[in-house]
Each structure stands twice: as structure tokens, then as C-alpha cells.
Amino acid sequence: MTPAFEDILRKPDLDREEIKLLLSAEGDRMKALLRRALEVKLARLDNCVHLRGLIEYGNVCEKDCLYCGLRSGNGNVERYCLSDEEVLSCARLAHELGYGSVALQSGERSDPAFIAKIERLVREIKKIDGGSLGITLSLGEQSDDTYRRWFEAGAHRYLLRIESSTEELYYKIHPRNGKHSFQKRIACLESLKRIGWQTGTGVMVGLPFQTQDHLADDLLFFKRMDVAMVGLGPYIPHPDTPLYRLRDLVPPAAERMDMTLRMIAVLRLMMPEINMVAATANQTVDPQGREKAIAAGANVIMPNLTPGEYRESYFIYPDKACVKDRPDQCRSCLDIRLAAIGHRIQYNAWGDSLAFTKKAKG
Ligand code: 5AD
Ligand code: SF4
Ligand code: FES
């Protein structure tokens, strides 16, 4: 290890060249990077992992992202939408399991019935045990007015991945068919922040045509947008999607995993107090993927609470983890897996982003 490399690991502000150097670290250098990121996380955030019980509300989607199994053009999906009672019983289960927060995720819809139903559900979830559950929404691009309605109903965190912060790459993975706009997505992130949401974004790692320059720019984008949360995960080719044809341009699973870990670690150095999700997709490319992501600097896990009969229909990418496991099994599984790497779950707390709460206090 050169002293110069060690110095970069301790710099408060990393420039693009330094980020690229860290993203290309292998062997001992990569180990040093992950070790440093873990040290920074433990110093700022302790060894706590926050849970968000994931409720996959529905797989109807208006969009046509070229990588995702839920795209509207995929005719091989049985579409579903949970009833109010199904969503609320998932939320009650989250509360009983001590998860502290739920995340409601769905394919993108903007019809008035959907918007009203989500608003109603947020209000109902807030009634459980006097508002004890935190609510994250991940429901795509919406109007200012919709974002405001859902926020006023009581949800307070919103995840909207930019997928790639390079406009050119964005349009290689989203069709230019009038339904997808890079500028609109950025405008949505800005609107969420303006309204007061704890705002999160993220990208997929290992996309066809994606370079280290793109990934370095993604990290700088997160920093520039000053987001409170980030979700990063490996891209997983899905056979029923157009991007599958380019699967020969996708790096092997082990490389996607390592690049994801380096991205998490570098971002932890750059933004020490944000929340970062150890995405479930990590576990698809590596059985220990989520724990590795936690050990590289992530601090949030989203265990699945979707009722068993719908899980296989929420087929964003193949071989999703835990599809056949019951929520109580995931809970004890996570306890054990996290204890094995010296972490612990913080039960019965919202687990907000420290970066956000500090700023809110001024
Ligand atoms: N592989 C990995 N992640 C994917 N997503 C969608 N399709 C895939 C895929 N094939 C991610 C996107 C989206 C989130 C809901 O799932 O980043 O924002
Ligand atoms: Fe729909 Fe989201 Fe999948 Fe795109 S990534 S097709 S918006 S569910
Ligand atoms: Fe679901 Fe391990 S977390 S079985």
C-alpha cells in the first residue's frame, strides 16, 4: 500500500480522479478501502442496522425501463395489486416484528385512483400504534401535488433511483418513447427535497456500457444533490427484457458485487452520515451479498413482507432472495447473519438518516 493511497482514504473531499482510483482498487487496496469505510460508519453511525419492512404493493407499471421485468411491455407477468387490508396487515406485521418502518414499493402508476389509495393507506398505516411506524415510499415519478399529498398524509422518506446520472447512459437503458425523461427524474428529486422528504436515490452497477467514469459521476451526483439516502445494487439481466440481449456486455457476478462494494465504501467516505441500503439484489449475485454490503458501509436492510402468493409476480429481476421465506424466518436469519459480522438490528425505531436529521435541526 502506498502512503498516497492511505492518505486518500482519509481525505474529507474526494475529487473525480481520486474516486476513480478508489473504484479501481483491488486486493489489499480494496480491503483497505472497505476497512476504512467500515471504520467511518462505526464512528458516525455505530453498528446499528435499520430495517424497512418491504411491501411490494403492485406490479402494474406504466413505464418501459429496458432492464426491468415489470415494464409495461412485458406480457409474461401476471399483474396484481394488494388490497387495503393486505397492505395494512403487512404493516401490522412489521410493527409486531419490531421493524420500526415500512417501505411501500410499486410499479409506477399515476392514475387518480392509485394516488388516492396510497394517500389513504399512508394515513391508515400512521394510525397503527399511534404513528409508531416510519413510512418510506418508492412509487416512481409523480407530480409535485402528489408528492405533497403523500407527504402530508404522513410518509416522510422517498426513494427514486436515478439509475444512471449520465444522461447518455440513462437513455441507453430507458427508451426514448415519450414516457421516460432524465430531466423529469431530476426535477422529481428536486421536488421531493423541496417538499421536505428525506430523499433517496441510487443506481444499478454493472450495466452494459457503464464505465468507471459513469460510476464516479454517480457518486459525485449523490453528493451534489445532497441526498439523505442511497440504494445501490448490481444490475441483474432479466430474460424477458430488451436489455437482456446485451448480457455479454455485463461483467461477471463477482465483478458486479465487488464494484457495488467499492461504490458503497467510497460513498461512505464521501457522505459519512447518509443511510445506505444493502440491496436485496446483492444477495442474488452473492449469497453473502447483503452482509458484505453492510460491512462495506451500508446500514439499512429491507426484508420482504409481501404476502407469499404475490412475491413471484414482483419479478423485477431473476433469482430474488427470500422469495420463499416467511417474515419471521427472515427476521431471525438477519439477526444471526448481522451478529456474525458484529452488527445489530435496531428494532422499534424509524432509523432516519443522520445526515438529514442533523440538517433539519440546523
Ligand atoms: N437488476 C437490478 N435492479 C433492477 N431494478 C430494476 N430492474 C433491475 C434489474 N434487472 C431496480 C431499479 C429500480 C428498482 C425498483 O429496482 O434500480 O429503481
Ligand atoms: Fe416500472 Fe420501476 Fe420497473 Fe421501471 S424500474 S419498469 S418504473 S417498476
Ligand atoms: Fe430472508 Fe435470510 S433474510 S431468509
Image: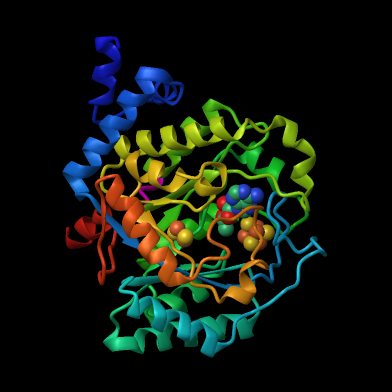
Query: What residue lies at 24% left-to-right and 42% top-to-bottom?
Result: 41
The image quadrant that residue 101 belongs to is: bottom left
Q: Nearer the viewer, residue 75 or 292?
A: 292
The answer, for residue 69, to whether it is visible in the render is yes
The answer, for residue 228, to whether it is visible in the render is no
- Residue 225: in magenta span: yes
Residue at the far right: name it.
75
In the rendered image, the vertical position of residue 179 relative to residue 154, given as above or below: above
Q: How is the image coloured?
A: rainbow
Q: Which residues are drawn in magenta?
A: 224-228
Query: What residue lies at 52% left-to-right and 90% top-to-bottom?
Result: 85
* The C terminus, quarter of image: bottom left
* The N terminus, quarter of image: top left
The image quadrant that residue 308 belongs to is: bottom right
Q: Nearer the viewer, residue 316 or 153?
A: 316
The image quadrant that residue 164 belongs to is: top right
In the rendered image, the vertical position of residue 221 relative to residue 76, given as above or below: above
How far from the left and from the top, in percent, is residue 120?
48, 88
Q: What's the magenta bit mostly, secondary-structure-wise?
A: loop
In the rendered image, the vertical position of residue 286 relative to residue 320, given as above or below: above
How far from the left and from the top, in percent, is residue 83?
59, 87
Numbered circles on residues, count: 0
How far from the left and from the top, in percent, is residue 337?
35, 52
Query: What residue lies at 33% left-to-right and 31% top-to-bottom?
Result: 34
* 335 left or right, relative to 207: left
How far from the left and from the top, in percent, is residue 257?
51, 36
* 123 left or right, relative to 280: left
Residue at the far top: name it.
2
- Residue 307: in magenta span: no
Query: What residue lies at 51% left-to-right and 48% top-to-bottom?
Result: 283
